[in-house]
Amino acid sequence: MAQAKVPNPIDKHVGSRVRMRRMLIGLSQEKLGDALGITFQQIQKYEKGTNRIGASRLQQIAATLNVPVSFFFEDAPGGSADAPAGFAEGRASDYVSDFLATADGLALTRGFMRIRDPRVRKRIVDLVTVLAEQNDSAS
């Protein structure tokens, strides 16, 4: 029996960035697919990294999602953040991208970005920091 193909880390990263941006602007897979002239199933495969996105298609997706193509490669594996041990934190930002791709992460980000008063935003950050510290000490 053939072994299942494992998605390339870059393809997976680019796909997760497509998903994050699509969800952040409130666009369904179906609507993105319609805009690109492809099925929502193809969008699913792109987002999971199981199908590689070609250059022209990535340009089309970037235009549809209103971001530069470079957006999809920010913090990608193998980038400058992958400095040798002792010189950088490495892939510490992966968990942030993973969180932002979740429904909770998107809802939190959307709500937070709607708060205009910088003092209120700072108080929310302080609150979350205190709650996280309490959670850590309770563990």
Image (cartoon, helix red, strand yellow):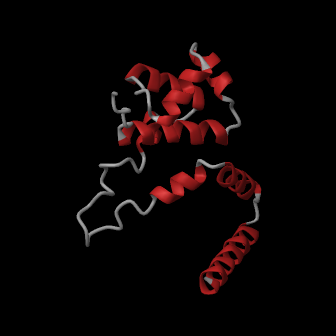
Give the camera-side residue of 75 and 6: 6
Looking at the image, the residue that sits furthest to the top is 37
Q: Position of residue 49 (x, y in %)?
A: 45, 34
In the depicted structure, whether residue 6 falls above or below residue 54: below
Residue 1 lies, in percent from the top left, at 34, 27
Image: 124 above or below 115: below
Left or right: residue 8 compared with residue 124: left
Residue farthest toward the left in the current orientation of the protein: 84
Q: Residue at x 38, y 24 (%)?
A: 55
| Whether residue 63 is visible | no
120 to the left or right of 44: right
- Quadrant for residue 80, please give it: bottom left
Residue at the (40%, 27%) spot, across then down: 52
Which residue is at the far bottom? 137
State the image coordinates of residue 57 (x, y, percent, origin top left). 46, 21
**Total number of numbered discs in the rendering:** 0
Residue drawn 30% across and 57% down? 82
Q: Is residue 116 something one can see in this rendering?
A: yes
Q: Quadrant where the C terminus lies?
A: bottom right
Q: Is residue 139 above or below residue 12?
A: below
Q: Residue at x 75, y 59 (%)?
A: 116
Which of 7 and 97 lies nearest the eye of the viewer?
7
Residue 64: where, in percent of width, then height? Answer: 58, 26
